[in-house]
Amino acid sequence: MELPAGTWAGVMTNPQEEGAIRKLMSFRGVIWIDTSVGQGLILADHGALIAAYFKDGYGTFRGKAAFDHMGHVQADEDGFRLEFNLYSYNDNEYLQAVSICDAEGLTLPEQKKGSVARIPNLLDEAKLKKILSLPGVVAVSAFFEGFPVQSFGEADFEHVAALAEDLLREGIKITREMEIGNLNQLILETATHKIIIAPCGDLFLCVFTLNDAQLGLLRVSIRGLQSEQWGTERM
């Protein structure tokens, strides 16, 4: 499969680094993805995820299946390599790329219906850092579609983001089946640490703490972020 060459727009090896999300939100073109386990591409239009492809030892994935699979890709024992090579498109190149991707079955179903699968609004960075500063908090991250899009602190969320989202979705199903209201937060606890996972608008918030962290204070801070995303009617 050949897409228009486009114009070189840079390379990213850490999509979580400061400014990366803003750059992707203003980018239109193809992102060629090279990892230690497989290769693929994403066609993007100013934050809209248009099409995707990924191939690794498990098979070849197209469209939404490619996004889902990329979100579950795990690091290998020798370290995980990730590289995004960006090539921007003009109007003509972009239309050609959309046509090719559609013919190859790479386009997201939402795009075929004419709707736009856009990256959601990011959470307030200052408030995330405030949560990070609370006693016992090790790291904070916000996930979207299996990828950490905002991360602060000392923890590698990249390879657990999709699992955390899946776990929270199952928790939401349980609360609905039991008819006990909306799930606000899910807490995992070990002898040494706690993990709080919470829906926050279209994002999923994950807070990683030591076992002696003050849950009451953390839960109030998380509810504050949730209320900004949803309003008070869901809380």
Image (tube, rainbow, N blue to C red):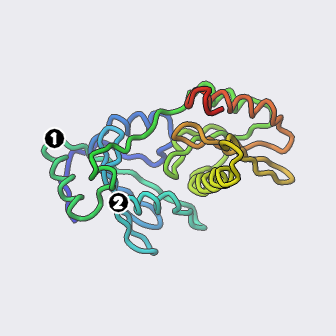
At horizontal 21% and vertical 52% (from top left) the residue drawn is 98
Which SS class for mark 2?
loop
At horizontal 66% and vertical 27% (from top left) the residue drawn is 224
x, y percent for residue 113: 28, 50
Left or right, 104 with respect to 181, comes to left
Quadrant in which residue 75 is drawn:
bottom right
x, y percent for residue 190: 82, 54
Label 2: how many Cα within 10 Å (few below 14, some 14–19, many 20+): many
Which SS class for mark 1?
helix
Foreground mark, 2 or 1, reads 2
Q: Report which residue position mark 2 lands on.
A: 63
The type of residue carrying mark 1 is: Asp
Specify the farthest residue to the front: 179
At horizontal 60% and vertical 24% (from top left) the residue drawn is 126
Left or right, 13 with respect to 179, comes to left
Q: Quadrant of the C terminus?
A: top right
Looking at the image, residue 133 lies above or below residue 13: above
Left or right, 148 with respect to 10, comes to right
Q: Report which residue position mark 1 lands on.
A: 91
x, y percent for residue 79: 57, 61
Label 1: how many Cα within 10 Å (few below 14, some 14–19, many 20+): few
- C-alpha span from label 2 to label 1: 22 Å
The type of residue carrying mark 2 is: Gly
x, y percent for residue 40: 36, 61
Q: Quadrant of the N terminus?
A: bottom left
